[in-house]
Image: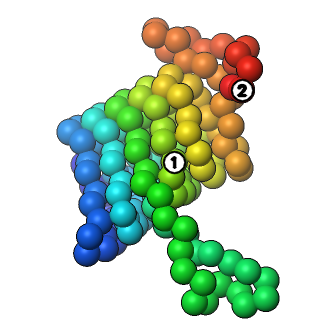
Amino acid sequence: MIGHGLFLQVGRASEVVIGDDTSINTGCHIVASETIKIGNNVAIGEYVSIRDQEHRFTPKTGVRGQGFNVGPIIIGDNVWIGRGVYIGPGSKIGSGTIIGANSVVRGNFPPGVLIAGAPAKVRRIIGPSGETRLPTEPGL
């Protein structure tokens, strides 16, 4: 399912791979300079922005003409991405993960967790039956 107003921008040498049974809701932006891979059975809420590139910035010269930081994005299977989420360059989202609405995602996240916030952090661990618990392992 692709919702109304999807904005998809792909560079000449880049790729976007979208798995089976994935839904992309209204108003989403997917921008690939290199690679964006979205797994199977992923549910993407409204107004989500997935971008494998973002502008560089220096205070002396501003944003124009500074180029981009680019890194592939990989989103595993069975991920639920809430409304208004931003996923930035180099992010890897493990399978079976939930991303809370309006989160700003950068970095690597393990499978089976709930992440949320700006910046997004692991807030809960999701068990095999959907039950959740607070993270107890160091680094989570």
49 left or right of 56 in image:
left
Q: Is residue 64 above or below residue 138?
A: below
What residue does disc 1 label? 91
**Residue closest to the far right:** 59
Q: Which mark is residue 31?
A: none
Q: Residue at x 54, y 80 (%)?
A: 67
Q: Position of residue 111 (x, y in %)?
A: 49, 26
Q: Could you tell me which secondary element the residue under label 2 belongs to?
A: loop
| Category of crowding for the residue at label 2, using alpha-carbon neighbours closer than 10 angstroms: few (below 14), some (14–19), many (at least 20) | few
Q: Disc 1 residue type?
A: Ser
Q: Position of residue 83 (x, y in %)?
A: 52, 49
**One can see residue 47 in this view:** no
137 left or right of 6 in image:
right
Proximity of marks 1 and 2: CB atoms separated by less than 8 Å: no
**One can see residue 103 in this view:** yes
Q: Which mark is residue 139?
A: 2
Instruction: State how far apart marks 1 and 2 are (Cα).
Output: 17 Å
Q: Position of residue 50 (x, y in %)?
A: 46, 58
Q: Is residue 137 above or below residue 61?
A: above
Q: Nearer the viewer, residue 137 or 86?
A: 137
Q: Nearer the viewer, residue 104 or 4?
A: 104
Q: Earlier in the sequence, mark 1 or mark 2?
A: 1
Q: Could you tell me which secondary element the residue under label 1 belongs to?
A: loop
Q: Residue at x 52, y 33 (%)?
A: 98
Q: Disc 2 residue type?
A: Gly
Rendered image coloring scheme:
rainbow
Q: Residue at x 71, y 26 (%)?
A: 139
Q: Position of residue 58 (x, y in %)?
A: 73, 80
Q: Is residue 68 above or below residue 62?
A: above
Q: Residue at x 40, y 45 (%)?
A: 74
**Residue closest to the far left:** 20
